[in-house]
Image (cartoon, grey):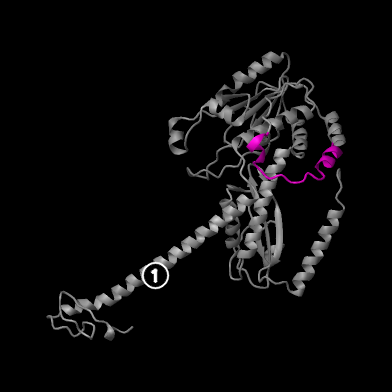
Amino acid sequence: MGYDKVMVTVDGGEEDPTGGYGRKDGGKGKRSRLVCPILLLVALVFAAAIFGGVAVIGSMENCYGVLDQCRSNFTHVDDGFLADMHVEIRQKFLRNAAFPSAGAAGAREAEPMTGDSAWHVLRFPESGLAEVNLSLVGHRAQLRRQVQITGGGLYLEGGRTELRYYSDTEVPFQQESNFLYLSGVTDPDCLFFIDVATGSNVLFVPRRDDDYAIWVGYVPTLEEIQAKYKVDSVRYVDEFQEVVGAFAAAGGGDYPIYTLPGMQYEERLASYSVDVRPLGPILFEERSIKTDREVDLTRIAVSASVDAHVSVMKFIRPGMYEYSISSHFLDFLGQCGFTQLAYPSIVGSGYNSAILHYTANTAELYPLDFLLIDAGGQYEGYTSDITRTFPVGGSFTPEHAELYNMVLAIQLRCLTQLRPGL
């Protein structure tokens, strides 16, 4: 709309069909020149607010849609479920690791899943699990004959708080997997000890001062930590020598301590004979056979990751960049309540799709490119690992189809060859 059609008045002056440019008020009308641009600017801001609000609402609806999709596939487990799972794991570990003196004196009994708690997660058919577990009995028995721990203690170190180079910024924390497996503890800077003779376990936590609470958050009491993780005892790290010394004195004679290679135990365990050989094979073997609750958590990780991959396939368009795809995958899992990925996502298009551990994720996507995405979520320490390849443009060219079907045929043939015990 032109200015010559705008009727304006300023400071009570007469209306002027010229839009104020021919005012008879002593030149004050020149201020009216600003009125139309201001009105236009206000209108643009108002329109942007409306459309921006629509976009935000649409984005929120999308988030809620993701949440609904996640909830339809699984329900998050609580601390009680996790604590009971790790109690079961410790019992299984002590029982299957052939510790002759430990017997049935392991940790407290895990609470059975009853009532509402029995439906924390979806249940799937257990086809094949029993057969697989039975097939491994012979292998496990052979391993136990080769490697046995008959006394002493088991020592594991949790992950440490690390800072980013020369700064006060903490690197995102990832718990050490073996420590998490036996203790269930997700906090940094902790130690875990099991006395083989009694099966008793002790979690050692760092002392945190008031400054830590100000910067990081609430510091739970020892009693609260014990209740959360359902360990036998919780002590401070600086009490380690006292506690382990008491176990050693009760055992009498030599008290060897078994740990894993790479643990920084030299100073803390200087008074004991340390063996890094037998614990690893036993622990790794036990971790390969999951309890029902572990299977549940793995299914949660896989279910959400599958949905994230499908969402990526619907989201992708030519002209996007690999990092946009990686961000979308992470965002979807974040909406589902996941706080960690299983590993850095590999999103490679074109030639990048042939690089095994490509993580730059910076290239532009073109219509005829193949896109490979190797990504998975991690849920309470249990992960998924999913790789899919598909054309960016949404349609398979003859060359795409030939290559895709060739690899698919090989994969399907390999699946037919799978047998328990291989």
- Where residue 59 sits in the image (x, y, percent)? 51, 60
Q: Quadrant of residue 371?
A: bottom right
In the rendered view, would you say 242 is above or below 313?
A: above
Q: Is residue 132 magenta?
A: yes
- Where residue 134 sits in the image (x, y, percent)? 85, 37
Residue lying at the far front of the rendered structure: 115
Q: Is residue 244 left or right of residue 209?
A: right
Q: Quadrant of residue 243?
A: top right
Task: Out of 81 and 198, give the one closest to the viewer.
Answer: 81
Residue density around tag 1, few if under 14, some if 14–19, many if 20 or more, within 10 Å: few
Q: Residue at x 52, y 59 (%)?
A: 61
In the rendered view, would you say 67 is above or below 405?
A: above
Q: Residue at x 71, y 57 (%)?
A: 387
Q: Is residue 409 left or right of residue 209?
A: right
Q: Is residue 132 left or right of residue 189?
A: right
Say which amino acid is labelled 1: Ala
Q: Is residue 236 left or right of residue 303?
A: left
* Range covered by the magenta-colored residues: 113-136
Q: Residue at x 84, y 30 (%)?
A: 146
